[in-house]
Image (cartoon, rainbow, N blue to C red):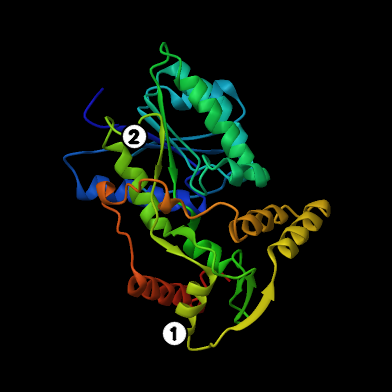
Amino acid sequence: MGEYFKNVLLIGATGDLGQHILTALLKTTTTHPSQPLTISLLTRSTSTAKFPSHPSIGNIYKGDIKDQGFLTTAFSGKDIIISAISPYALLDQKLMLSVAAKVGVKRFLVGEFGMDTRDEELTDSVTVFRQNREVLEYAVEVCGDTKVGMEYTGVICGAFLEMTLLDGEMGFGFERRTVEIYDSGKKKIEVSRMEDVARATVEICFQPGRYADQLVYTSSFTVSQRDILEALDKVDEKGPWKVVERTTEWLKERGRKRVEEGDMMGLVDEIWAVAFSDGVGEAFSRKRRLVNEELGIGRGGDEDFVEVIRGIVGEWEAGRRK
């Protein structure tokens, strides 16, 4: 094993998180020229995305992620594969893992980036999380073969704070300054800034002797809906926010109806119905070891959180997620 994973392939560089990971990878090659990375990107054949011109970006592979031959070409010669794949294509990672193992990839960073996959009560309750667990179990199986020589790592970070707030997933509607509070609204969950998640992901590239065959846990903040509302009322000049009391059962039922009507955003309702349900699961920082400090990622307090929320309000007013 070399001193770090130098040849990196990023899958999903055009996604919300993938863009942050690509930025962090490119920044690393600039700020740490003694540890240069060779970065390759993989995207669908139908993608029209434009990527930055940068000397560290090598190949850009465009093709069908279900095509074993295409994946073989893209994965060959890579030290580490970072999968920031869409949540709607999670199971495609099973073929990716198989191909990566065959061509000698050293580490596969599976597309976890969410709630605690090891919390069986949580994953049993949500359709998408069951897919996460299926992929994780497959990664364990593939990497458990001593003849393979590949390791897996997954990053568990909770919800992406900026994206889920601005997109209204957590019940906060910026257009009308209205929030739907589910159950007590006091259920604590883990949230992370996407910038922090990206930095943690890239740092793993430089620590090949650590985090093999395991999930690593990182979180920027542990908060509730009530905490978010309190912060918004402090910094949002268009507040105070109107509160609508709901139950998580109501949210779960809305999600079920949306899925029946062909609206896959109903799956998002299902996730939050479980996440905010009192007594189902718990904030993983209470029972898992966080790796924030060893990866150089800050763990914020109340004042830090208020400032982050101030920035998110500014993002909305600037029209960046409308």
Q: Is residue 70 above or below residue 294?
A: above
Q: Is any atom of residue 301 visible in this view?
A: yes
Q: Secondary structure at mark 1?
A: helix
- Residue drawn at x 21%, y 29% is 3
Which amino acid type corresponds to the residue marked 1 in the rendered image? Lys
- The answer to whether marks 1 and 2 mark residues whose Cβ atoms lie closer than 8 Å is no
In this rendering, is residue 149 above or below 31? above
Q: Which residue is disc 1 drawn over?
A: 234
Say which amino acid is labelled 2: Tyr
Q: To which quarter of the image does residue 312 belong? A: bottom left
In this view of the protein, which residue sits in the foreground, 143 or 224?
A: 224
Residue 198 position within the rendered picture, expressed as x and y whole percent measured from the top left? 38, 50
Residue sitting farthest toward the left: 34
Quadrant occupied by the N terminus: top left
> Farthest residue toward the right?
261
Question: Is 236 placed left or right of 169 in the picture?
Answer: left
Q: Which residue is mark 2?
A: 211
> Within the image, what quadrant is residue 208 found in?
top left
Dividing the picture into quadrants, the one containing residue 184 is bottom right
**Residue 2 percent coordinates (x, y):** 23, 25
Please name the residue shown 64% across and 44% down the image.
Answer: 128
Residue at (33%, 46%) from the top-left corner? Answer: 25
